[in-house]
Amino acid sequence: MRLAATLSGAALIALLVAGVPGRAVASEAPALEPYHLVRCLQLLQDRIASGDQASLPLQRRLLEMTDERMRTADVDAFKDPKNFRALLIYAMSGGNPLTIEQVVSRLELEEADQKLAQGVIDYLRGKPKGTVEPLAAIDPLTQISELGAFLALVKGSVSIAEQPEQAMKLFDQARLLSPGTLVEEAALRRSVALATRLEDGGRFLRNSTQYVRSYLRSPYASQFADAFVGGVVALHKSINLDTLAEITAMMDAEQERVVYLRIARRAAIDGLTELSTFAAARAVKSRDGAPGGADPRAQLYSGLSSVTSGTAADILGKLGGIDRDKLSKGDRALLDAVEAVASELTSAVPAAPASASKPLDIGDLPPAAIEITPPPADPMIPDAVEASAEAAPAQSAAPEVPAAAPASPPAEQPATVAAPRVVPLTAQQQPEPAEPEDPKITEARRTLESIDELLGGSPK
């Protein structure tokens, strides 16, 4: 049966590639059972997960065909368990919620199947509480592997907020039931972010290794990169940097350089000088270990990492040699902001009193807070569900899908970086201290507060 599905999928994809008009193809669709079309859809999505991004437009057309077939199928067709399972899988593969509700409303289902269908519908509608109860008693491992994998992914996604350890187990089940598929890709991506939340450095490195090895060319790999960079910064004290280097070595040279630049940038802003210096140094090295050309981004982040430890004059001298023309618009704004802070400090901060017993160690001050942003939502997980599960604002919202044209996964859009707002230190409202304070401590704290305002987009 799997072979038959593979052949059907290959034939259908060949028709789409040949440019057969959508309506002409759709007119032939009734000859296929709903589960045939859904298996073709799964085959196409698995190709996309492995890096075949040229298949993204085909996915939309196949979703349209599948949607029409589901809406026009006779009620008797869904008495076949394969077609009913296909309906649920289609729903969790980017299908149209309106179509699922319409079909389910026409079916006479047993109580267990009705709960299962309602749980999936609530999930699509972004109602995690409505999803948890109907699916609570369902063990994904007892289901047909294709359906069980999706159910494990769904249950894990709505369990993150209250049961993160259980969510991790469910993601492992999804991967076990559906290796080499878009489901595994999504489960691994979520596991990387969740390992950071659980402060599990070992699992973070293992899952990152597996993702880079299998899915680095997925259209959703940029979401993994967000979680990976955030995890490295958050877990830097508990992970082995040599293992980190082994993971990035599996990337191509430009991907590796960008990842290290992003780590250097994030670590510099968060005041993690050692990590920022390490990442900036790795960013400018070639694969053979020889020093590469000076990257102005690495110079900027390396300079930024010393903002709270060096003097304003030293900082201005280091940043003054950066080639601004080779920086992105966002990083030029960041450079301007750091130079403005350093210049203000040069003129505004009095010299330390001669009676000071020793120079201030910036390490004695509380570090800047580290805020780990979860990866953006992807088409397999409704935005409202992910926003609730991760307890963080969603970075993007998927448009509502019209009944006749289910949405395909959107292409990654480059992040827009807003120029940071620099407030002169003399204009900030500083609370009066209860007692006199060392001017160097005041300088360091003001610097940290100013740099915290500079947190912005990632380097391009």
Image (cartoon, rainbow, N blue to C red):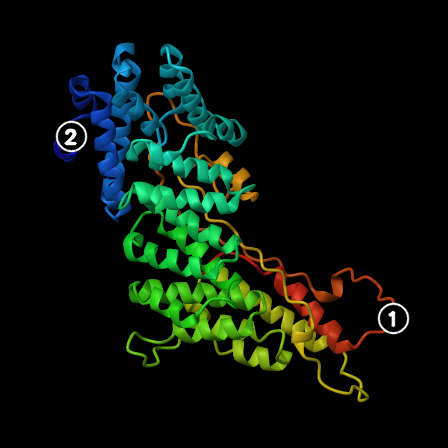
Q: Residue at x 73, y 86 (%)?
A: 358
* Residue 71 in picture, x, y percent from top left: 31, 16
For the residues labelled 1 and 2, say whether their Cβ atoms are less than 8 Å apart: no
Image quadrant of residue 47? top left
Q: Which residue is mark 1?
A: 435
Q: Nearer the viewer, residue 182 or 108?
A: 108
Asked if residue 15 lies left or right of residue 148, the reply is: left
* Element carrying mark 1: loop
* Residue 204 in picture, x, y percent from top left: 43, 58
Estimate how packed mark 1 is, as few (under 14), some (14 to 19) or many (20 or more) residues with alpha carbons within 10 Å.
few
Q: Amino acid at mark 2?
A: Met
The quadrant of the picture occupied by the C terminus is bottom left
Instruction: In the rendered structure, find residue 359 and report the number of the disc placed on it.
Output: none
Image quadrant of residue 20? top left
Q: Earlier in the sequence, mark 1 or mark 2?
A: 2
Q: Residue at x 42, y 42 (%)?
A: 170
The quadrant of the picture occupied by the N terminus is top left
Q: Which residue is mark 2?
A: 1
* Element carrying mark 2: loop
* Residue 145 in picture, x, y percent from top left: 29, 35
- Judged by depth in the image, the label closer to the viewer, 1 or 2, is 2
Identify whether 179 is placed above or below 322: above
Q: Nearer the viewer, residue 166 or 180?
A: 166
Asked whether residue 332 appears in the rendered view, the answer is no
Q: Residue at x 47, y 54 (%)?
A: 195
